[in-house]
Amino acid sequence: MTGPADVIFYVLAALTVGSAIFVATLPNIIYAAVALLFTFCGVAGLYVLVSADFLAATQVLVYVGGILVLIMFAVFLSNRISSVKLSNPVHFRLPAAAICLTLFGVLAYTAISPAFVLKQEITYQPTTARIGELLMTRYLLPFEVASVLLLAALIGAALLSRPDRPDIPRPDMEEPK
Amino acid sequence: MGLKDYLYDIWEAVATTAKGMRITARYGVDPRETITLQYPEERWEPSERFRGFLYNDIKTCTSCTMCVRVCPVDCISLESVRGADKKMVLASYDIDIGRCMYCGLCVEVCPPKSLKHTSGYEKASVDRGELILHFIHEDAGEIKARVAKQVAEAAAKAEAEKAKAESEKPEAEMAKDGDPDSRAAQKDAPPPAGGNPEGGGAAEKKPGEEKE
Amino acid sequence: MMESLAISLVNAVPVLSGVPLWTITLLIMVMVAAVVLTFALTYSGLATYVERKVAGDIQARVGPNRVGPVGILQFLADGIKLLLKEDIIPAKADRFLFVLAPYLVFVGSFAAFVVVPFGVGLIASDLNIGIYYVMAITSLVVVGVMLAGWSSNNKWALLGGMRAAAQIVSYEIPVGMALLPAVLIAGSLSLQDIVRSQGGLFGIFGWNLFHNPFTFLSFFLYYVAALAETNRTPFDIPEAESELVSGYHVEYSGIRFAFFFLAEYGDMFVVSALATACFLGGWHVPFLDAEALPALWGNLFSLGVFLGKTLSLVVLMMWIRWTLPRLRVDQLMRVAWKYLVPLTFFNLLGVSLWLLLFHGKGIPQMIASLFG
């Protein structure tokens, strides 16, 4: 089966994998972040290709609009952005290689194992309503647990940003009356 | 902050925004509020005592150099020679209008009231030299030469008259300040009023008038 | 939709039957994209002219009136000027990112035009995740703005970029939450479905704006939050010219600056179009069903109605801009987190309860059912 869809798939895959390699190897952390942007977009494109539209939009919204912006904020606010040596250090090569190879083995085994049933006919259907239903019924508990975790993180962040010593006056954000 | 304050804040924000927007809407909709003057086509009338470009009426100017002395920024330069009739003859009278700060001191001190402010205020040029207003267009050297010639002629005439008088009447003194012919020549010597009253404004005014 | 168009085209013109279908589909897609982009750019250009005229009127001035009749060609003059200007890249800037950033902003802003429902059949792609797509794709703008700020290697640009990012990320939450009531009522994320759900015989009372008190409030909350998301006065902290010179695009000139400029006006349109589609009934007008008209007239009529509503909202934005002074940074964050976020959540809860209690019926519908 070769058609435009296949070509698009390979282009997207090349974009994703290529920019992922850049993320791992580029010494400049800002460039790595930009490469990460293209990786995310490539993954979103792959989602679109398998007609997982909601997932694709979520990928862009959460990873590009949230995670990537957060990473960039962290980088911008650190004071030694420009020093290339500090930004992307290479440590623990051997353990990292071992972990990666193991992970790759597991993934490769899963991919080629006959556990996946190939569907012959593909019907493109909106997935949003189905995802919503599943989140509210079958996967309600994981969903709620995840939201509690995020809430805890939110409260933690708010707590951390407050000065803990009472003698330091809190920066007054209120309108002077 | 209680709930009441919270709601009051929201109400205040909405109310004040609405008030502001009502005002700007009135300005936006009402054409009478537009105060822009379409300058080259429309222009404001300068007030009576407006201090515009300086204008020197060189016919009445006595070359007293009061204006040159009083000018705080030294923008007036004046050259004069003594004419055959013992009066000063202007050889050149320049005002660097680019330097002038329109303080009006020169106008106030001018004894014959020949220096005046006009209502002109439009002068743009690409060269600073063009900002110097020349009130005498003739070359200063020529005027000087001519005046010197006239003085010499007058002196020669006086000499001749003296000699004649001496021959006739040795005690007689030179009574007249040169003959009438040379006076008339002096009056004609400076060309008609240098610099137009509007300064360079007249030239700039034309396109606007054409548009209208 | 594109594929069905392509099929009908092949059926109509038999010469094309030898060409693979996907190339025709692709060609039609490119053409539609070109049309939408041309519209977007023309609109942006004219909007700059209207903005200056509105500003002039409000400030008791005249505004541009020299180029063409009443200055209508001013935007062309400006555009040509921007195109011809020198494209300066600062020596200490990060060249690659400096060049990349305007494109990200431009793409993020104008890709949202794809799902704007201009008329009955006039929508580039009726994605079934329409609103969600807009929210997602505009997050590219944040990245572009941050990169622009950082790569300029200028302290004002960096501050502006970070402020812009913080502001857009903060205001995305109330924007999303304020749009959700419309999604709840229509039961779909597709903008065309949301517009269709507001039709019916009630005239303007079919609009979501008058569905119930919560949606009424929701429209205004959305408008305020969206105004902040487009970085316009009174929320133009990122480019506050009196303190940050002009924020993240200080160092940009020529065509790259034009990209940022056009993206801002594109954002304004998208935001207003979403407000129109979600709350003001999209292309619906009282007592005339555009869908019942013949296809051509229906499309033209609905296009006119939709543009009329959207552009009025754009002009309202300009009016607000030239009325209100700028907020302080802390006030900006206070508005987002202490007022808009709680109120939009409260609204969402209210709408959900309303739909649950009254079985999805709005107030106009209930009044109508009273009289049989």
Image (cartoon, coloured by chain):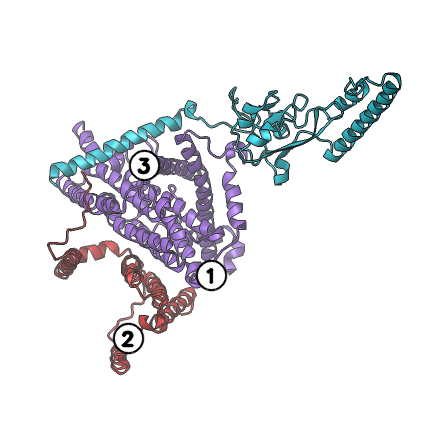
Chain drawn in cyan: B
The numbered disc on residue C324 is: 3
Work out how far the residue at label 1 is from the one at label 2, CA to CA, in angstroms: 49 Å
The image shows residue A165 at horizontal and vertical percentages of 12, 57
Specify the amino acid type for callout 1: Ala
Front residue (pair C41, C280): C41
Question: CB of mark 3 within 8 Å of CB of mark 2?
Answer: no
Q: Which chain is purple?
A: C
Specify the chain shown as red.
A
In the image, taking residue A35 as reference, residue C99 lies left or right, namely right
What chain is tagged by disc 3? C
- Mark number, residue C21: none
* The quadrant where residue B100 appears: top right
Callout 1: 10 Å neighbours few (<14), some, many (20+)? few
Find residue A62 and report its horizontal and vertical position in percent.
27, 58
Whole-percent x, y for residue B201 in the image: 61, 29
